[in-house]
Each structure stands twice: as C-alpha cells, then as structure tokens.
C-alpha cells in the first residue's frame, strides 16, 4: 500500500532550501522513500500558508484534489496524508473523502501528532519538575482537531486550564466534553497565567508575542507554521519553546529527509507511514477517535517511531 503526504510552503522563501531536483513545474515532489514494506512520496503545493488560508476555499480544495488525483494516477497512491493547513481547508479531510475522483484513503495525521504533543508535555513535566495539579495549562486553538484531543487528555491532569478559540459556542461545546475541570474559556489570547501553553492553531504565521507569556512559561508549539517565532525565543530567553510534532525515524529504514532535523520527520507523516505498514484501509479524518489515537501510539512502539529528545526549531534543548 503506497502512501503520499501533501504539504505546502510555509513561506515563499522556503523554496530556496528545497533540493532543486524536487522542484517541478506545478509541485514540489520528493523521490520515492522506501520504508521496507511500504513506500511513498512527499508532495508540496507551491502555495504558502497565507495563500492556503486566505485564498478562496473552493480554489484551495480543487488544488488539493488535483494533487491527490495526480498522485493516484501517476504513482498508484492509495493512502494520502493531509499535511499542515491542507487539513483545515478540507473540513478536517472529510471533504476529500467525498470526492469520487480520489478513490484512496485519507488521513490527516493529527491523531499521532496529538499523542506526541501530549508526550512532549509529559517529558516537560518531568524535566522541569512541574506539578500539573498545581499548575495552569493553556491550549490555543483548543477546539481544533489536534487541540480538542490534547484538551481531552491533558486538561483533567492540570489544576487549572485556559482554552482559547475564536468561537464561544465551540468553546462551550468542547468544555462539555471535559467535565469536572477547572476551566476558563476565552476568545481573547489571555494566557498570561499559564505555566504550560500548547499552540495548535491554523493561523498562518506567529501569533504569540512576549506580552502573552508569563515569566518562565513553557510553550509546546504544534502549529505549522509555528505560532511562536524564533525572534520571540531570542527576545524572551526565560521562556522555553518546544517543537510539538517531531519524531525520530527508526534507523532500520535508513531514511533521511531533507528539510527536517537529522533523522526526524513530522509525526503526521509518521502516522501515514505506519497506517500503510499496517495496511489499514480506512479514513482517519475529522474529530480524533481517542481509541485510534492510542492505537497510533502502539503502532509507533511496534515500528520504532519515537519522540526522543525535546527540541526547539529542531535543536536539542
Ligand atoms: N507538528 C506536526 O507534526 C503537525 C501535524 C499536523 C498538524 N500540525 C499543525 O497543527 C495545527 C492545527 O492543525 P489542525 O489540523 O488541528 O487544525 P484545525 O482543525 O483547523 O484547528 C485549528 C484551530 O485553530 C483555531 N484558530 C485559528 N486562529 C486562531 C486564533 N487566532 N486564536 C485561537 N484559535 C485560532 C481555529 O479556530 P476556528 O475554527 O474558529 O477558525 C481552529 O479551531 C496546524 O498549524 C497544523 O499545520 C502540525
């Protein structure tokens, strides 16, 4: 079962760092990567994060569908992962599953990403001696696909939590799924009291600034493009920014992917590779099924994908 992952440029500058041989007229296309019992491609749309979010949605959906059909017809791709903001503009991937022109299976890769982000928080708690029951958590983008799963898992562990979103009704509906928790729901980016912050929005650029963060806050930045800039890390050496979604590729595969920290890749891509290895012929789109999320952790254990060390913009902390 062959897989592919569709992503896009974060910014136009990023094209300069991509191997020249990957740059095709319409797409950025990797060579075929071999993972023993499966293989696949990474395809990048030559469109930036801002274009994905701000150009007409129907136009973006058609571009994603065309890429999916291209991968299906040219390389016999049966399983497609929607990377970065391609999930947000396809109704969490559900839209693509309803298009007859693409006959394969669709996975947003958010389930293993949410599991890894929770694991990052567990490692942070250990490393910095944080007592969750005495600490405050903020989840920015809390009712998004990743944000919701993370909130369900982590809010019950923290003494107090702040969930940030743009829509009050959606915040309330999420809160109803996490009963008996000390919660503050807000449509303002009011996270100044949080000890641990998780950012999982689809905002196409940095969103968190110095004034938002208390002294010594730890921020797990899951968002791609990142919600916390490198500049802010320099401006605020007291805060710790941690990448939310990198995992180490098992060395037995001997795969190294340009553009990623050495030996690593995004957990969403790891998820689709594992799904292909499992020959799981189903869609994993929309809201995360928490049982399936646990299943991705078991797959990771089986195949050897793991969150090894904490990193900030790819560098070990
Ligand atoms: N690191 C990795 O391996 C990895 C893997 C997969 C995805 N990601 C990234 O994770 C992020 C979330 O992905 P997703 O699939 O969960 O997206 P999603 O389902 O579209 O959720 C994103 C959420 O962000 C909210 N949001 C946007 N701007 C906001 C703001 N200014 N304040 C508060 N909330 C805001 C949106 O709210 P509304 O609904 O009200 O618009 C939406 O609920 C994306 O950046 C994606 O690229 C990373």
Image (spheres, rainbow, N blue to C red):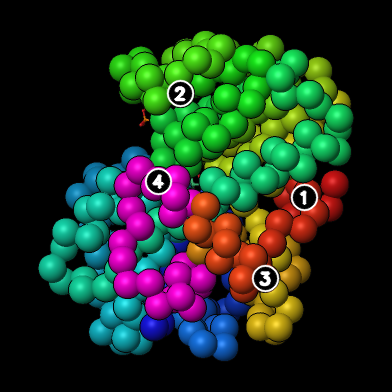
Does any atom of ligand 1 lie closer than 8 Å to the CB of label 3?
no
Give the Cα separation between the discs numbered 2 and 1: 30 Å
Can you tell which of label 4 and label 2 is closer to the viewer?
A: 2
Q: Is mark 3 on a helix, strand or loop?
A: loop
Is any atom of residue 129 visible in this view?
yes
Task: Residue 230: name its quadrant.
Answer: top right
Q: What element carries label 1?
A: strand
Give the Cα separation between the discs numbered 2 and 3: 32 Å
**Contact, CB < 8 Å: mark 2 with mark 3?**
no
The disc placed on residue 178 is 2
- Could you tell me which residue is drawn at 49 percent across and 32 percent down? 152
202 lies above or below 174: below
Badge 4 density bin: few <14, some 14–19, many ≥20, Cα 10 Å: many
Give the Cα separation between the discs numbered 3 and 4: 23 Å
Badge 3 density bin: few <14, some 14–19, many ≥20, Cα 10 Å: some
- Could you tell me which residue is drawn at 69 percent across and 74 percent down? 250
The disc placed on residue 304 is 3
Give the Cα separation between the discs numbered 4 and 1: 25 Å
Residue that mark 1 sits on: 311
Q: Is mark 4 on a helix, strand or loop?
A: loop
- Could you tell me which residue is drawn at 21 percent across and 71 percent down? 102
The disc placed on residue 288 is 4
Does any atom of ligand 1 lie closer than 8 Å to the CB of label 1?
no
**Contact, CB < 8 Å: mark 4 with mark 1?**
no
């Amino acid at each position: 079962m062959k897989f592919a992952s569709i992503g896009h440029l974060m910014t136009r500058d990023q094209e300069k760092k991509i191997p020249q041989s990957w740059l095709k007229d319409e797409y950025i296309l990797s060579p075929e990567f071999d993972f023993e019992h499966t293989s696949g491609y990474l395809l990048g749309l030559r469109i930036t994060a801002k274009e994905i979010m701000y150009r007409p949605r129907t136009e973006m959906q058609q571009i994603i569908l065309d890429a999916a059909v291209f991968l299906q017809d040219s390389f016999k791709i049966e399983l497609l992962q929607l990377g970065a903001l391609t999930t947000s503009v396809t109704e969490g991937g559900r839209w693509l599953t309803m298009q007859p022109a693409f006959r394969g299976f669709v996975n947003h890769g958010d389930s293993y990403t949410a599991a890894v982000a929770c694991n990052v928080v567990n490692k942070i708690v250990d490393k910095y001696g944080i007592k969750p029951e005495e600490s405050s958590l903020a989840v920015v983008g809390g009712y998004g696909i990743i944000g919701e799963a993370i909130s369900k898992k982590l809010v019950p562990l923290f003494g107090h939590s702040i969930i940030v979103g743009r829509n009050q009704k959606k915040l309330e509906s999420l809160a109803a799924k996490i009963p008996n928790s000390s919660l503050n729901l807000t449509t303002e980016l009011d996270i100044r009291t949080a000890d641990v912050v998780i950012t999982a929005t689809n905002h196409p650029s940095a969103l968190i600034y110095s004034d938002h963060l208390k002294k010594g806050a730890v921020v797990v930045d899951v968002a791609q493009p990142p919600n916390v800039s490198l500049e802010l890390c320099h401006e605020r050496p007291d805060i710790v920014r941690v990448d939310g979604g990198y995992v180490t590729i098992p060395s037995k595969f001997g795969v190294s992917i340009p553009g990623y920290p050495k030996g690593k890749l995004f957990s969403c891509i790891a998820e689709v590779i594992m799904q292909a290895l499992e020959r799981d012929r189903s869609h994993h789109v929309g809201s995360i099924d928490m049982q399936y999320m646990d299943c991705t952790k078991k797959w990771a254990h089986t195949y050897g994908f793991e969150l090894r060390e904490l990193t900030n913009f790819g560098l070990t902390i």
